[in-house]
Image (tube, rainbow, N blue to C red):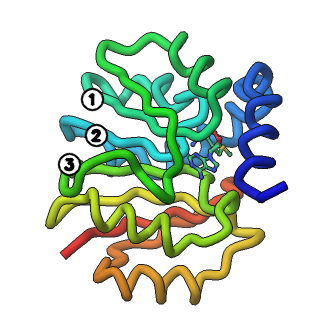
Amino acid sequence: MCKKLSVREDYDRSAVYYDRRYARIQFLKYNMLSHYLIGRDLLFDLGCGTALILKLKKLGKLRYIGVDISVMMVKMALKRRHFYKDFIIGDVEFLPLRGGVAELISAFTVLQNLEEPAYFINEIRRILTGGGLLVLSVLKKNLSLNRLKTILEENKFIIKRFIEKSDSEDLGLIISSI
Ligand SMILES: C[S@@+](CC[C@H](N)C(=O)[O-])C[C@H]1O[C@@H](n2cnc3c(N)ncnc32)[C@H](O)[C@@H]1O
């Protein structure tokens, strides 16, 4: 089976207990990077999962669009209360979105699931507006930072900050498009 299908099936299976099992570690990442999500109008959250991030009170009235490949994760996300939320079931490597629609994108702990991160970064390049911001969190344990940096540079992204905390399993990257 191709990696994408097995990833989707794994997350479909884990959707019902995802929050119980992962909320605590995901919140360490959200809190580490939330500063960059506040005060904006609309967030595109790629690989949104159960949209756990919407439990972060400080997001306030941020309109939210989540994209995820797992139907079951999105079903759980739909139950979450938020004044404006919308979801797309789709593949972050081939986004069903027109170009230049996003000023702010987040992707928390998604990269490790992808076979070809370059497709994902190309898609972000396509949908992000000039001057837009990408807030990325990537698992430190299987991170190929040099490769990621190369892909980002090829797409004319600038890494503005690396954010690391010892209690978070992810490294945070604040990335802007030119
Ligand atoms: C570790 S979870 C993180 C979920 C969420 N970002 C969070 O902070 O809880 C990874 C998510 O990425 C999604 N995912 C994996 N590969 C994907 C793809 N190619 N396109 C869209 N979503 C994908 C999975 O379905 C899963 O919901």
Q: Position of residue 18 (x, y in %)?
A: 74, 29
Q: Are marks 1 and 3 in contact (CB under 8 Å)?
A: no
Q: Residue at x 70, y 25 (%)?
A: 19
Identify the residue under disc 3: 101
Tell me which label, 2 or 1, sits earlier in the chain.
2
Tell me which label, 1 or 3, sits earlier in the chain.
1
Q: Are marks 2 and 3 in contact (CB under 8 Å)?
A: no
How many numbered marks have been drawn onto this rendered protein structure? 3
Q: Position of residue 72 (x, y in %)?
A: 67, 24
Q: Residue at x 69, y 62 (%)?
A: 112
Q: Residue at x 47, y 46 (%)?
A: 46
Dividing the image into 4 quarters, which one contains the N terminus? Answer: bottom right
Q: Residue at x 35, y 68 (%)?
A: 175
Pick whichever, 44 or 136, lies toward us.
Answer: 44
Label annotation for residue 62? 1
66 relative to 97, above or below: above
Q: Amino acid at mark 3?
A: Val
Dividing the image into 4 quarters, which one contains the C terminus? Answer: bottom left
Label annotation for residue 37? none
